[in-house]
Amino acid sequence: MCLFSSKTVALCLGLAAVARPTTALPNSYLWQENGKFYWSPRDESHSVALNVKAAGNLTAVPFTSKCSVFTGNDSVPITSSLLDDFVESYGSTDDVWSKSFLDCIIIQGCSAGPISDFVATNNVTTVFTDRISNVQLPKSVALYTIQGSAVGSLRNGPYVASVTGSGSVELSPVYAVHEDTSLSFMSGSLPTNATSDSYVARNVGIPGALQQGIAVPSRLSSLPVTDEHPLAGLRFAVKDVIDVKGMKTSGGSRAYYQTYGPRNASAKAVSQLVQGGAKMIGKLRTTAFAQTVPVNGGEIDYQDPWNPRGDGYQTTSGSSSGSGSAVSSYDWIDFALGTDTGGSVRFPARHGGLYAYKPTWGIHSLDGVFNGVSELDTVGFLARSPSHFITVARYWAKGTSLDTPAASALPPTLTYWADDAALEQAEAEKMKQDFFAKAVALTGLPATRANVTEKWKTYAGPDEDINAYSGDVGGILGPAQFWDRIGADLVEKYSKANSGAWPPSDR
């Protein structure tokens, strides 16, 4: 690990063309710049090796530099004006890339035309291109041609480029690193390689930080947004009762995590999102076996995540606690997967100011997902942005009964949940009522009110309490099904490995 401060980064990664010292390169880079930490892994699984040839001005000499990849169109040569457009787009789209990665630029997919104005304006010291055209550069700027099978295959975005004297270049992708201050994550994650559907747990230590660092990829490195990949550019994380290939599933239990190995396949809910272009960045905390709501300070294995709203000590209110906490806390994650048996997606959204997607039971596969009560369980997700919510929900609905044309996506009516008593704070109650009224006015849909508690009594009898009934359903079916599917096998394997001891749990 090579650690750079904001003062020394220019010496190590922003090298001038005339001062390129040879150094023994570490297996990864970690540096701070403008108050933000960046990390770049140099292992073979994530780096790309290029063969290059010095094409002008300077011969190939060893150096290390921050770098940006730009992909053009075969029919249009790259010019200074087009590069300016790229830079504007990168800056408005991505929260990892910045202009500090313009020390070195790689142009692929098209010829490089007159770019000297861009090079001079942005203090570019090195240019790589996979084909030469009308490239005119100052003598102080090095020019290289890329050769071999990697031509045109690079993803856009920020890299660290390490050039050797033998004419090879190692490109390592750059991640932003964010401290998990809300304790939302079990761990970060990385794909085992650039094309793999398998992942490894990976946290990045931040000097001086109390909590683990989560590596966040550049949005620019995603596939282009298409009908096949509508989720490209979005990042998500997964509640740790949902399997991810190559990673362990803890279920919120240290005993379970210690007993079972990495999963051989991802849950369909995860693989479908990745196929749609979204990038998974980690696994999220949950209550033990997702059996109940979090009680702040009540968990014995993994501390409950923090809720950033209010004074920070409010409950996240559901077993998808890490999912709600992460999306509420961090603008670098767009949505999170959770599970819902009796409200574990809906309640964290309610307590975190988020949008919750809890689909009709049976719509989505539960393969690779811990079951609480099979007759009630669903996978769902939480999102902060209405547009992201709609994009993910529509993609996830493909091939199901929810896959409806956009023109008929609105429901026939808007229904107000009238079971809850009015809020104690009159202003808060008014805000709630005003929001519903505005939604009705905006959509033009007819409005109805539903009181499920009272409706229940018309079927079950006036003295029957729906809350007591649903509590009995969860309280009886949940433990019984948990024991049959998970508990018995866990006790047997854990006890065998621990001299007959019973696996500790707060549930």
Image: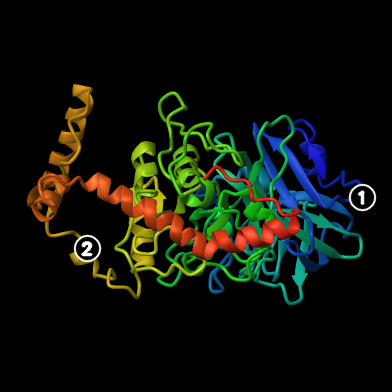
Q: Which residue is mark 1?
A: 24
In the picture, measured across the screen, residue 34 lies left or right of residue 351, that is right
Residue 71 relative to residue 268: left or right: right
Q: Which residue is the site of mark 2?
A: 409
Decide if residue 242 is in sight here: yes
Residue that sits furthest to the front in the current view? 500
How far apart are the alpha carbons under marks 2 and 1?
58 Å
Residue at figure coordinates x 63%, y 66% from the top left:
263
Percent position (x, y) of residue 468?
A: 26, 45
Q: Residue at x 48, y 70 (%)?
A: 367
Q: Is residue 134 above or below residue 18?
A: below
Between 376 and 21, the one lying in front of the other is 376
Residue at the (61%, 69%) spot, across then down: 197
Mark 2 is surrounded, within 10 Å at the Cα level, by few (under 14), some (14 to 19) or many (20 or more) other residues, namely: few
- The picture places residue 383, in percent across and down from the top left corner, at 40, 49
Q: Percent position (x, y) of residue 261? A: 68, 63
Q: Secondary structure at mark 1?
A: loop
Locate residue 478 relative to residue 71 in the image: left or right.
left
Quadrant in the rendering for residue 12: top right
Q: Could you tell me the amino acid type at mark 2? A: Ala
Which residue appears at 27% of the width and 72% of the height?
401
**Of residues 256 and 414, the one drawn nearer to the viewer in this rendering:** 256
Q: Position of residue 160 (x, y in %)?
A: 74, 52
Answer with mark 2 or mark 1, whichever residue precedes in sequence: 1
- Can residue 247 be seen here? The reply is no
